[in-house]
Amino acid sequence: MFCIVDSKEVFFSVGVDPNPYNKSALWTNNPGMVVIAKEYFEQAWRKVEKAKKKNVDIPIAR
């Protein structure tokens, strides 16, 4: 799981949990890590949009 904040910070968590703050995680403002997270999100978004046009279900978080 990850969360991008204001395109300046990113929070990465290694598990799926309703309260990720109790788990191991990385919170960083490293520009390289932010770019990686943003690019991953954009690619996943494009993949879902393409699948929607074809009426195909696609799991993106695997």
Image (cartoon, helix red, strand yellow):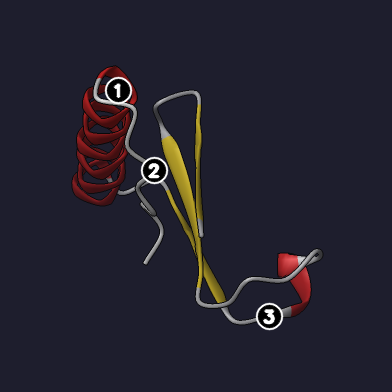
Closer to us: 23 or 62: 62
- In the image, residue 25 lies at what x, y percent? 55, 73
| Residue 53 in the image: above or below residue 56 | above
Picture residue at 18% right of the left edge, 47% below the top:
32
Closer to us: 43 or 57: 57
Which residue is denoted by mark 3 in the rendering? 23
How many angstroms separate mark 1 from mark 3 (CA)?
31 Å
Dot placed on the residue nearer the N-terminal end, 3 or 2: 3
Q: Amino acid at mark 3?
A: Lys
Q: Which mark is residue 35?
A: none
Q: Amino acid at mark 2?
A: Asp
- SS for dot 1: helix
Quadrant assignment for the C terminus: bottom left
Count neighbours of disc 3 (C-alpha within 10 A) and say few if under 14, some if 14 to 19, many if 20 or more.
few
Q: Nearer the viewer, mark 3 or mark 2?
A: 2
- In the image, residue 19 lies at what x, y percent? 81, 65
| Residue 22 in the image: above or below residue 59 | below
Which residue is denoted by mark 2 in the rendering? 57
Is residue 25 rendered to the left or right of residue 62? right
Q: Which mark is residue 49?
A: 1
Picture residue at 25% right of the left edge, 41% below the top:
31
Picture residue at 21% right of the left edge, 25% below the top:
50
Picture residue at 59% right of the left edge, 81% below the top:
24
Count neighbours of disc 1 (C-alpha within 10 A) and say few if under 14, some if 14 to 19, many if 20 or more.
few
Quadrant of the rendered structure where residue 59 is? bottom left
